[in-house]
């Protein structure tokens, strides 16, 4: 299993009364019922693969939410008798438009309630993914918290540090974010009032036809005199609903994310030394539930994307 096969898919859902329905697909090649998924193409992120594969297999356009689960299993390589390890990442995907048409890979789609969907699924790995999806409410508010992209070394910049722009590498990261963030359907864009923070999400705002709103409380200078106010500001943005993008700094994001996670008992991935990661150009997808309007949003899950750039794609099986 020296070569990995990377794939991505989603638990595709839509509202159904007080609950939801899940889309399962039948693949005649394998005669199985499964969650929609497919292999990563060159130049894709996992999120992009999930959205593309949903469209190809089901005919529906999906808006991504939280990362639900990752599965691993062995698949045969082409003709040489070897086994490869296949890794599949699944997202929550809300169906927003479209209609199913039979195609080369899928000849039938069924919308089912959660219990019925679990009974129909062929593979235990898909059942595990569906149960992870059921563990949280499907209708969550997504906050896309971005650390600004690379802006070169501070010591090499002689001007006002607030005006230090993105480097060439940072511009590539910003271009990748322009492609990645729309998969989550953002509708508002906020930023710490530094040029590099604004430039990181500027193309996303331009595509939406809106202005980037400055958020001083989410800059390093505005946050640290009173972190409670900065956290409250992010929660106010989340409470308004929709899918906001917030561009901030490495001196803010780890403390803000860890404070929310500690408050609401949400496990976080950590880098060496137990520090909450926040690489330049990285993304935290924070998912909030609203159990009580009086107490405000509650963090339900937190997913970290170290880079917006496409994955290096291993050999295809």
Image (spheres, helix red, strand yellow):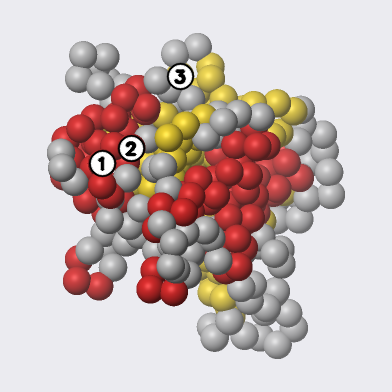
Q: Nearer the viewer, mark 2 or mark 3?
A: 2
* x and y, in percent, of residue 118 in the image: 48, 38
* x and y, in percent, of residue 68 in the image: 43, 46
- The answer to whether 80 is drawn above or below residue 157 in the figure is below
The residue identified by callout 1 is 222
Asked whether the beta carbons under mark 1 and mark 2 sit within 8 Å of each other, the answer is yes
The residue identified by callout 2 is 216
Circle 2 crowding by C-alpha within 10 Å: few under 14, some 14–19, many from 20: some
* x and y, in percent, of residue 188 in the image: 52, 30
Looking at the image, residue 249 sits to the left or right of residue 57; the answer is left
Q: Quadrant of the C terminus?
A: bottom right
Distance between mark 3 and mark 1 Cα atoms: 41 Å
The residue lying toward the viewer, choosing from 238 and 62, is 238
Picture quadrant where residue 155 is located: bottom left
Q: Tell me the residue at 83%/43% (across/down).
A: 103
Q: Disc 3 on helix, strand or loop?
A: strand
Q: Tell me the residue at 26%/47% (across/down).
A: 221
Distance between mark 1 and mark 2 Cα atoms: 5 Å
- The answer to whether 41 is drawn above or below residue 108 in the figure is below
The residue identified by callout 3 is 19
């Amino acid at each position: 299993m020296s070569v990995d096969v990377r794939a991505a898919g989603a638990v595709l859902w839509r509202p159904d009364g007080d609950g939801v329905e899940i889309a399962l697909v039948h693949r005649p090649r394998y005669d199985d019922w499964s969650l929609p998924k497919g292999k990563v193409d060159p130049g894709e992120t996992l999120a992009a693969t999930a959205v593309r594969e949903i469209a190809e297999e089901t005919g529906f356009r999906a808006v991504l939410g939280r990362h639900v689960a990752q599965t691993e299993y062995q698949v045969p390589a082409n003709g040489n008798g070897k086994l490869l390890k296949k890794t599949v990442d699944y997202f929550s995907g809300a169906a927003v438009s479209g209609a199913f048409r039979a195609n080369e890979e899928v000849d039938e789609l069924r919308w089912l309630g959660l219990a019925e969907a679990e009974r129909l699924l062929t593979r235990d790995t898909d059942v595990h993914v569906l149960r992870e999806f059921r563990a949280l409410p499907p209708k969550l508010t997504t906050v896309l918290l971005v650390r600004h992209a690379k802006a070169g070394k501070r010591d090499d910049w002689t001007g006002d540090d607030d005006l230090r722009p993105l480097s060439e590498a940072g511009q590539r990261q910003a271009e990748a974010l322009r492609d990645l963030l729309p998969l989550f359907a953002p509708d508002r864009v906020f930023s710490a009032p530094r040029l590099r923070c604004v430039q990181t999400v500027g193309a996303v705002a331009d595509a939406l036809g809106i202005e980037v709103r400055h958020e001083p409380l989410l800059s390093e200078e505005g946050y640290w005199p009173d972190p409670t106010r900065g956290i409250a500001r992010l929660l106010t943005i989340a409470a308004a609903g929709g899918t906001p993008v917030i561009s901030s700094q490495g001196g803010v994001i780890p403390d803000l994310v860890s404070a929310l996670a500690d408050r609401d008992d949400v496990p976080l991935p950590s880098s060496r030394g137990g520090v909450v990661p926040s690489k330049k150009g990285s993304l935290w997808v924070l998912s909030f539930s609203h159990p009580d309007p009086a107490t405000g949003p509650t963090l339900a899950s937190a997913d970290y994307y170290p880079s917006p750039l496409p994955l290096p794609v291993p050999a295809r099986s």
